[in-house]
Amino acid sequence: MKKFIAFGLTSILMALTLFATGGCSSASQQTASSASGKGLYDSNCAGCHGATGAGSAAGTPLNAENAGDVKQVSDITRNGKGSMPGFARKLKDDQIQAIAKYVSTLPK
């Protein structure tokens, strides 16, 4: 019983520490998130927009006009535009943000 109480108190202290420090976010996690943008783009977007964002018969190029900034790309990815479906039901918001940040690095 004493071990159970000690484990419970330790768990509570760890949870409070994470809450007080803002969680486990670190520079390495943010870098991993940015890197995952390419993987998410490759698996969800490149089929239509091409590996470099140059477009294809199925999707428009991701140039300054239609992929000008992270917010615009996030909104379009989330809600869709024209014949492009929205991905709000398939991807989490942080995944959509990672894709948008990655798209902002593609040549325009």
Image (cartoon, helix red, strand yellow):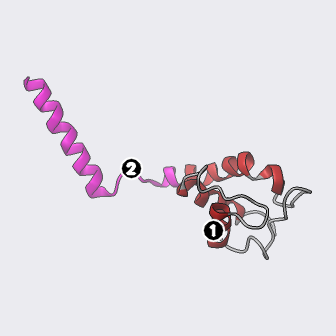
Q: Residue at x 33, y 57 (%)?
A: 22
Residue 82 seen in the figure: yes
Q: Quadrant of the N terminus?
A: top left
Foreground of the two, 1 or 23: 1
Residue 101 seen in the figure: no
Q: Which residues are magenta?
A: 1-30
| Residue linked to disc 1 | 75
Foreground of the two, 93 or 30: 93
Q: For the stretch drawn in magenta, what is the main secondary structure?
A: helix
Q: In the rendered image, which quarter is residue 56 located in? A: bottom right
| Residue linked to disc 2 | 24
Query: Where does residue 75 sit, x and y in percent of width and height?
Result: 63, 68
How many tags in the picture? 2
Q: Quadrant of the C terminus?
A: bottom right
Left-right relation of 85 to 94: right
Query: Where does residue 26 sit, x and y in percent of width and height?
Result: 44, 53
- Are discs 2 and 1 less than 8 Å apart at CB? no
Q: Amino acid at mark 1?
A: Asp
- Crowdedness near tag 1: few (<14), some (14–19) or many (≥20) residues, C-alpha within 10 Å: some
Query: Where does residue 77 sit, x and y in percent of width and height?
Result: 67, 61
Left-right relation of 4 to 75: left
Left-right relation of 65 to 34: right
Q: In the rendered image, which quarter is residue 52 located in? A: bottom right
**Comparing marks 2 and 1, which lies closer to the viewer?**
1
SS at badge 2:
loop
Query: Where does residue 64 sit, x and y in percent of width and height?
Result: 78, 75
Q: Amino acid at mark 2?
A: Cys
Foreground of the two, 89 or 32: 89
Q: Residue at x 73, y 67 (%)?
A: 81
Q: Residue at x 25, y 46 (%)?
A: 15
Whether residue 10 appears in magenta in the rendering, the answer is yes
- Crowdedness near tag 2: few (<14), some (14–19) or many (≥20) residues, C-alpha within 10 Å: few
